Image (spheres, grey):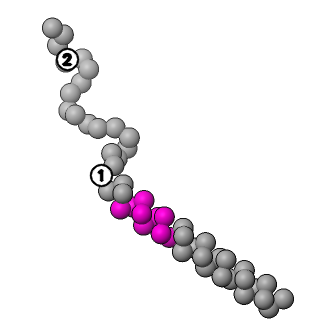
Amino acid sequence: MKKFWTFFGIAVAVFAAVLGALAVFDRITQKNRVKDGYLDCGSNEEHIEEE
């Protein structure tokens, strides 16, 4: 039973390390992402002039 808990502990530690590495990688690669899903360009659709 002791070997099982050792294996379980190692598996949990590896899983946590992989999850942490993915979180750090995502944070680094997504530094310049658009917040709230859209860009605010400062113009309204009502004021756009058509040519």
Q: Residue at x 20, y 17 (%)?
A: 48
Q: Is residue 12 left or right of residue 47?
A: right
Indicate the secondary structure of the residue bearing disc 1. loop
- Which residue is located at x 54 percent, y 70 percent? 18
Q: Disc 2 designates what residue?
A: 48
Q: Is residue 13 left or right of residue 51?
A: right
Quadrant in which the C terminus appears: top left
In whole angstroms, how far apart are the C-alphas of marks 2 and 1?
Answer: 28 Å
The residue at 76%/85% (across/down) is 5
Q: Position of residue 45 (x, y in %)?
A: 26, 20
Extreme-right residue of the structure: 1
Rendered view: 6 above or below 21 = below
**Would you identify the image quadrant in which residue 12 lies?**
bottom right
Judged left or right of residue 32, residue 16 is right
> Is 47 in the magenta?
no
Label 2: element kind: loop
Look at the image and give the residue range highlighted in magenta. 20-28
Relative to residue 51, is residue 4 depicted above or below? below
Q: Amino acid at mark 1?
A: Asn
Q: x, y (%) of residue 38?
A: 34, 38
Foreground label between 2 and 1: 1
* Image position of 47 with respect to 51: above or below: below
Residue type marked 2: Ile
Above or below 50: residue 40:
below
**Quadrant of residue 43 in the image?**
top left
> Which residue is tagged 1?
32
Q: Where does the image place residue 1, in percent across and percent down from the top left?
A: 84, 88
Name the side, left or right, on which 37 lies relative to 14: left
